[in-house]
Image: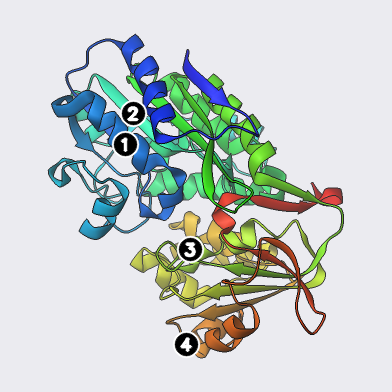
């Protein structure tokens, strides 16, 4: 059921608009005594999910008893991050999701189903895992809060991904990531319906249908001045609210280009992007736009690690970003990759497949570290002087010496593709 919807290319929803939308939706649900909020973590700060969580707390007050950021494999939020993203929400409500230890398996999606939807690329069962708080917390309302935007693993982020991946366990996260990588990222990006989503939808229908989950979904874009604004808000308990948000997100967040791009410069906000695990959105979101033999330059002042999880960081450092056939062969040969399929998927996603070059300009990693994972290295200060984020505008820029580049100030907000590749 869809409890509230508002959104269009021209809409700009204020905090008051969102507050009113939440009230309309929540009033239809009746009185609730134990509410669990599942917002994204700080890596999705620009999703406006923080504001939605604040407004939800204002509505429910003491009835909101738990807030569980959907960390997935990410590190726990710090107190300053919580204070900045969720101002006014008591810190004693926040719980930390431990994807290795704090999960329960609700059921198993059959291997035959996964083989069918993946077109024979994957043939294993998938466990529908969630944080045990969703099962044992005795909540009469679970608010799944987040932004619908193009995504490398599941086509369009959010909806039940927030539940089964954001609060999921090792096996569920690993195997879901690998399904998408094996099927082909470029066949998934920007598409609401795909094999990974089908698997999660199966889990929702068969194992989570009695959970009191309501989805709060934003669509975020930029106005004419480059300021982030909410273009849409959709609230519901089924696929409809996600599909409507995904439809708007394609209009807001997807830029179709008439020609492939020879040089793309991407800036990674240091408060949001500290690892290539996250920072490789610069690759995921632009690979369909980059020309053969093109160049991607990533300005990454906050970059200090490869994986946010220590084990995944170790695997990235050990194997590096290689082509899909190379990573698949290494996975067949090495049990440690077989046990960490999300790392395998990430190594595939972070590759240019040899088609274009990737140059990282890190704030904290050394040249040797960057080159050891098969990226090119360039000095951050030197490249920032040439490609100054303070003077560049999103889109095409011509530098004083005549060089033309395509600049992206935040790769998490969009998807770019050459029209003949999509």
Residue bearing mark 1? 53
- Compute the Cα span from label 3 to label 2: 27 Å
**Cβ–Cβ below 8 Å for labels 3 and 2?**
no
For marks 3 and 1 on the same chain, the one whose residue lies earlier in the sequence: 1
The residue pinned by badge 4 equals 366
The crowding category of the residue bearing disc 4, from other C-alpha atoms within 10 Å (few below 14, some 14 to 19, many at least 20), is some
Name the spot of residue 344 as percent of width and height, x first: 53, 60
Task: Reply above or below: 421 against 278.
Answer: above
User: Between disc 3 and disc 2, whose residue precedes?
Assistant: 2
Observer-nearest of 320 and 332: 320
- Residue 350 quadrant: bottom right
Mark sitting earlier along the chain (1/2): 1
Q: Distance between the residues labelled 4 and 2?
A: 42 Å
Q: Mark 1 against mark 2, which lies toward the viewer?
A: 1
Quickly name the residue at label 2: 143
Q: Horizontal and vertical percent for residue 415?
A: 66, 50
Q: Which of marks 4 and 3 is nearer the N terminus?
A: 3
């Amino acid at each position: 059921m869809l409890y509230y919807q508002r959104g269009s290319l021209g809409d700009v929803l204020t905090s008051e608009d969102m507050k009113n939308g939440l009230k309309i939706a929540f009033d239809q649900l009746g009185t609730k005594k134990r509410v669990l909020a599942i917002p994204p973590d700080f890596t999705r700060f620009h999703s406006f999910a923080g504001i939605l969580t604040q407004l939800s707390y204002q509505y429910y007050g003491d009835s909101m008893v738990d807030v569980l950021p959907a960390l997935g494999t990410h590190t726990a939020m710090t107190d300053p991050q919580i204070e900045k993203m969720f101002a006014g929400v008591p810190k004693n409500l926040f719980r930390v999701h431990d994807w290795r230890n704090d999960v329960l398996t609700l059921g198993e999606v059959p291997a035959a189903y996964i083989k069918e939807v993946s077109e024979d690329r994957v043939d294993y069962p998938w466990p529908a895992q969630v944080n045990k708080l969703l099962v044992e917390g005795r909540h009469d309302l679970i608010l799944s809060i987040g932004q619908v935007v193009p995504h490398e693993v599941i086509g369009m982020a959010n909806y039940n991904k927030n539940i089964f991946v954001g609060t999921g366990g090792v096996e569920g996260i690993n195997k879901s990531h690998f399904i998408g990588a094996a099927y082909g990222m470029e066949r998934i990006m920007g598409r609401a319906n795909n094999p990974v989503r089908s698997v999660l939808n199966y889990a929702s229908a068969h194992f989570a249908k009695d959970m009191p989950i309501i989805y709060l979904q934003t669509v975020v874009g930029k106005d004419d001045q480059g300021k982030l604004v909410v273009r849409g808000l959709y609230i519901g308990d089924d696929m409809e609210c996600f599909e409507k948000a995904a439809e708007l997100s394609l209009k807001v967040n997807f830029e179709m280009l008439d020609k492939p791009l020879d040089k793309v410069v991407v800036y990674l906000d240091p408060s949001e992007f500290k690892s290539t695990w996250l920072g490789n959105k610069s690759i995921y979101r632009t690979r369909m736009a980059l020309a053969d033999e093109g160049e991607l330059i990533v300005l990454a002042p906050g970059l200090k690690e490869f994986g946010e999880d220590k084990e995944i960081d170790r695997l990235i450092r050990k194997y590096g970003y290689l082509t899909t056939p190379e990573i698949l062969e290494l996975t067949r040969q090495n049990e440690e990759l077989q046990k960490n399929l999300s790392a395998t998927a990430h190594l595939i996603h972070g590759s240019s497949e040899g088609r274009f070059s990737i140059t990282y300009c890190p704030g904290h990693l050394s040249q040797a570290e960057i080159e050891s994972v098969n990226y090119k290295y360039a000095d951050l200060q030197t490249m920032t002087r040439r490609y100054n984020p303070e003077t560049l505008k999103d889109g095409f820029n011509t530098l004083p010496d005549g060089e033309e580049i395509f600049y992206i100030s935040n790769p998490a907000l969009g998807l770019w593709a050459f029209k003949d590749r999509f």
